[in-house]
Image: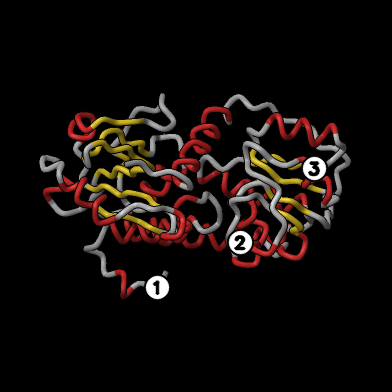
Amino acid sequence: MRRFWPLFLFLLLFIIVLIAIKSEPDRPAVQINSNPQRIISLSPSITETLFSVGLADRVVAVSDYCDFPIEVLDLPKVGGLINPNLEAIVSQEPDLVILPANSLRTIKQLQQLNIPTLAVRSASLTDIKETIVAIGRRTSHQQQANELLNSLEKTINHIKSITMNSDRPSVMISLGNSTSNENINTVYIAGQNDFYNDLIELAGGTNVYKDKRLNVPSLSVEGIIQLNPDIIVDIYPEADDHNADLQQVLQRWQSLKYINAVKNNRIYIVEESYATIPGPRVLLLLEQLAKLIHPEIRWDEISL
């Protein structure tokens, strides 16, 4: 049994982004418009950022996988990240297409069609913040972008201050796994080069995986036992977007009896739409991780 779309595809896209993002050259935009009125987004995180900085009325189309906020469900769809529909994009007459920075082929095609583009990154928490700034600047919504950024920083600093003096248990975040005979086979985890790693640190934990050479490491059961995480967090999107039996998933994890996370009953499954999207709602995941990593803190008495 395997997880397929959306989490399997999310993992594939996540790997592509992390591999390509370091070598991606900057490309000049075409016919830069400082106040675009017809914007197309080619990723869920970009769409959520556009809506968060008050540009909902300018978004005329989105990618096939954008489903938040609910208003985007009524917008035209123009394909996915890997296979955008250029004809559908052109038909919307956009004056700006915002897309991931590693989409080099699509950027080149759009520029050949004289369609302005803005390429943004989302691998790390810093990338997410810089994307907010870039979108605000390009759309003349700097004030709204700054307000969003200030709100993010305030929450980040608040949670960081609450957890900074606590013990820092080792955390492993699972992004996807394959199984055979109802046993865990291979697990893809958050490494040192992504926003999940940033969130673990801010939430008062430490990433159990230390090697920075691999962007999305894969581990066997033996590898997990060797790392021996104190806490395991298994990330799933919202229920409508996967067909996994989460009770069975939990039972598979619990079969790894010699791992601290299992022995101490600290296996957590996070099943939320925001858990796989590197956009403004990472704050929700940060808050959730902080509460899971440090249940000893009386969060009900703290205003977040």
Q: Earlier in the sequence, mark 1 or mark 3?
A: 3
* Disc 3: CA contacts within 10 A as few (<14), some (14-19) or many (>=20): few
The residue positioned 23% from the left and 34% from the top of the image is 224
Q: Nearer the viewer, mark 1 or mark 3?
A: 3
Q: Amino acid at mark 3?
A: Glu
What residue is shown with label 1? 303
Question: Cβ–Cβ below 8 Å for labels 2 and 3?
Answer: no
Q: Which mark is residue 148?
A: 2
Task: Name the one closer to the observer, 1 or 175.
Answer: 1
Q: Is residue 279 left or right of residue 98?
A: left
Count of numbered tags: 3
* Disc 1: CA contacts within 10 A as few (<14), some (14-19) or many (>=20): few
Task: Look at the picture and state if 290 lies above or below 229.
Answer: below
Screen quadrant of the N terminus: top left
Q: How far across and how far down the image is residue 104, in percent?
A: 69, 30
Task: Say which quarter of the image contains residue 119.
Answer: top right
Q: Amino acid at mark 1?
A: Ser
Q: How is the image coloured?
A: secondary structure
What distance separates the C-alpha of mark 1 from that of mark 2? 19 Å
Q: Nearer the viewer, mark 2 or mark 3?
A: 3
What residue is shown with label 3? 87
The residue positioned 19% from the left and 37% from the top of the image is 228
